[in-house]
Image: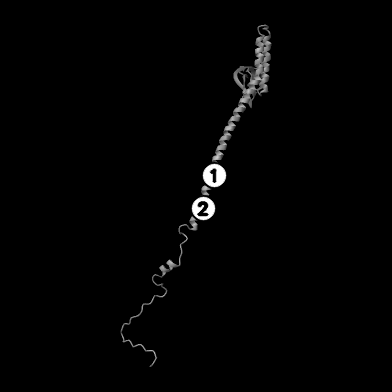
Amino acid sequence: MSTQPQQPEPVPEGAVTEQEPEQEQGLPAPGAAEARGAVGEGPGPDAAGGPAVAASGEASGEQAAALAELEDRWRRAVADLENLRKRHAREVERERAAERARTAAALLPVIDNLELALSHAESDPGSIVEGVKAIREQAVNTLAQLGYERQGETGVPFDPARHEVVGVVEDSEAEPGTVVQVLRPGYGDPGNQLRPVAVAVARRE
């Protein structure tokens, strides 16, 4: 028996032959992409519980902690400021009370001498004048010790920082604007003045 391959029968001219369908070059077979996605690919980076979500949660927690710490510091600072204000107010009031007490204590000897002079007025009426003069000098010295020296000079130019004009006198011998009469003495300097000197100044026609 012959083993040679059989030659295909000749196809008549114009006849249509059936061919097996061939896949287009370069295109994957239908369903290949779905199969590869189902078998080989895992969850994407945006899947729930991924690293991006965890990092965002940690950042939010740190911001909340920092905000709570700042709020706590702010509340402590406000409380400290309020305590400082109250302590300062108490200290100022203590200083004022102490200053009032020192001033009153400085005037006590003057009151004592007035009472002593009045007690001797009936037995020796003439001594009352000398006693009052001495008490006046004592009071003036007390004011000077407190920082308010007596001011009552005449013949000096008028100074609005020290003098208060309460009258004008025509005086041909004095320069215009010169203090010619002290109507009420003043106490203290311009920078620390208890009251100004009430004066009359000269003027010319």
Q: Secondary structure at mark 1?
A: helix
Q: Crowdedness of circle 1 by 10 Å Cα count: few (<14), some, many (20+)?
A: few
Q: Nearer the viewer, residue 176 or 112?
A: 112
* Residue 94 spot, x, y in % from top left: 61, 27
Above or below 63: residue 155: above
Q: Quadrant of the C terminus?
A: top right
Q: Secondary structure at mark 2?
A: helix
* Residue 21 spot, x, y in % from top left: 36, 77
Q: Which residue is mark 1?
A: 70
Q: Outermost residue toward the front?
A: 1
Q: How many marks?
A: 2
Left or right of 57 in this view: 186: right
Q: Which amino acid type corresponds to the residue marked 2 in the rendered image? A: Glu
Left or right of 83 in this view: 173: right
Residue 155 visible from this viewpoint? no
Q: Which amino acid type corresponds to the residue marked 1 in the rendered image? A: Leu
Q: Which residue is mark 2?
A: 58
The alpha-carbon separation of the residues under discs 2 and 1 comes to: 19 Å
